[in-house]
Image (cartoon, helix red, strand yellow):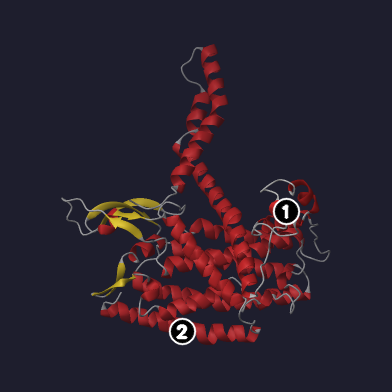
Amino acid sequence: MTGHLIDLWGWAHALSVFVLWLVSLPFRLLAWIANSVTGSARNPLDDFVSWLTGGGVTDAVTVLVGVVILLLWATLVHLLVVMWIERKFYSRLQDRRGVMLGLGSSDLLRRILGPIPLIGRPFRRASHLGMGFLQNVADGLKLFQKEVITPASADKWMFHAAPAIIGASTLFLFVAIPWSDGFWLMGWRETQLVNGVPTAVVVNPWGVLWILAAFGIAPLGILIAGWASNNKYTLLGGMRAAAQLMSYEIPLVLSIIAVVVISGTLDPFEFFRDQKGSLTIGTVSVPFLPNWYIFHPVLWIAFAVFFVAIIAEAERIPFDIPEAEAELVEGWTTEYSGMRFGIVFGFKWLRAVAGAALMVIMFFGGWSGPVFATLWAPNITTPAPDLYAIPILPQEFWFTVKVYIVVMIFVWISWSVPRVRIDQILHIGWRWLVPLSVLAILLAVLARGVGWA
């Protein structure tokens, strides 16, 4: 069993075939009428219907449908959930309840529902009900209603383009990152020999490069936003953000190179397959630890560099000085209002989720989870028990849980340590993380040479 619940490409293809069939119905009817009137067996409308429902158009629509599903998965699920998790978690860290849904505080509800037995008891006093999740929806509606103001002296084209660049690059991360063996869009299936058995596997040889390229686009949008606003605060914030992101993207890439040296691939699916089973270093097996790269003896430095760099890439505390609320009057987002501000502010959470997802793929086993049992047939002698493992829960569940745990660690750090100055940020990036990432590469090469990979 594969263990995944969602077959994104299959679902999108089935939906595309159905939609194109519906769209082709009027043309099929016209073609039938034309053939009946003229008495011919075929006319140009038949050729158009064949083209419309053919493989090329179907595949193109399948990609579009898959992209839409992934974008809805990112915005309607992860954005709202992660915003709620952060608000509740840092409230607990500060010994308060955080956002709540104040239904019980409504005098109208107390009057209407209070007299009802059992149901009305919680409404008979001023109290708060629910967990506050709908507060995120309310904030979004509020931002939609706010006026969008463009500064008179701003470069209007660049001012409007910056949020689109930031949002598009962030959403592209969710298109490029796989969430399970079936929940992916970038890649293809091919047959490979796994322990001597022909097996259909998913491959994407350049997946990590696509993800890093998407991470590298957003800093350009941030710099454009700071420059185009024609405001000294936004310009200062944009320049600081550009300097910070440049100084941390280099060690981020170098730390990934160390992992690539050990794994020998840039394929995120291969990262997942290489981290299955128990920990094995050379010929030594450690049965009580999973074969995650976080437990590899020479990848600790690479993980530490990657962890710090990804927090800086998401511009989270302690590395959020480019847009610090008090010090820089919201930094490069100062002149943005309404939903434009909501896009650039909300997509910071999505970038943190994408960074956590990449970290889980590279260091925490991807979407692998515990299995219930391993089934063997009496006539099977191939040593591949993972092919017959029954998962307790689907891969999408384990991957999402791991991602949210990493995000909670980000939140914990953000609300527990103070910000650092911009000169300290650059000092950490250039004078500490870059040399450590180079050291991680050298250790990975040494481990590969002695057979520890």
Q: Does residue 449 appear in this view?
A: yes
| Quadrant (top left/top right/bottom left/bottom right) for the C terminus | bottom left
Q: Which residue is more in the foreground, 14 or 235? A: 14
- Badge 2 element: helix
Please tell me which residue is depicted at 62% across the width and 71% down the height of the picture: 92
Q: Residue furthest right?
A: 152
- The answer to whether residue 283 is left or right of residue 279 is left
Percent across and percent down for residue 147 are: 81, 57
Tag 1: residue type?
A: Phe
For marks 2 and 1, the one nearer the N-term is 1
Q: Tell me which corner region of the image, top left, top right, bottom left or bottom right, holds residue 225.
A: bottom right
Please tell me which residue is depicted at 46% across the width and 35% down the height of the picture: 54
Q: Does residue 180 appear in this view?
A: no
- Badge 1 element: helix
* Residue hosting label 1: 123
Percent across and percent down for residue 334 are: 76, 69
Q: Which residue is more in the foreground, 312 or 289? A: 289
Relative to 183, residue 305 above or below: below
Q: Residues within 10 Å of mark 2 (few under 14, many from 20)?
A: many
Percent across and percent down for residue 386 are: 29, 58
Check residue 207 in the rendering and tell me which mark sits there, or answer none.
none
Check residue 436 in the rendering and tell me which mark sits there, or answer none.
2
Please tell me which residue is depicted at 80% across the width and 61% down the height of the picture: 150
Tag 2: residue type?
A: Leu
- The answer to whether residue 322 is left or right of residue 399 is right
- The answer to whether residue 27 is left or right of residue 375 is right
Inter-mark Cα distance, 2 to 1: 58 Å
Please tell me which residue is depicted at 48% across the width and 62% down the height of the picture: 401
Q: Which residue is more in the foreground, 43 or 115? A: 115
Percent across and percent down for residue 194 are: 26, 57
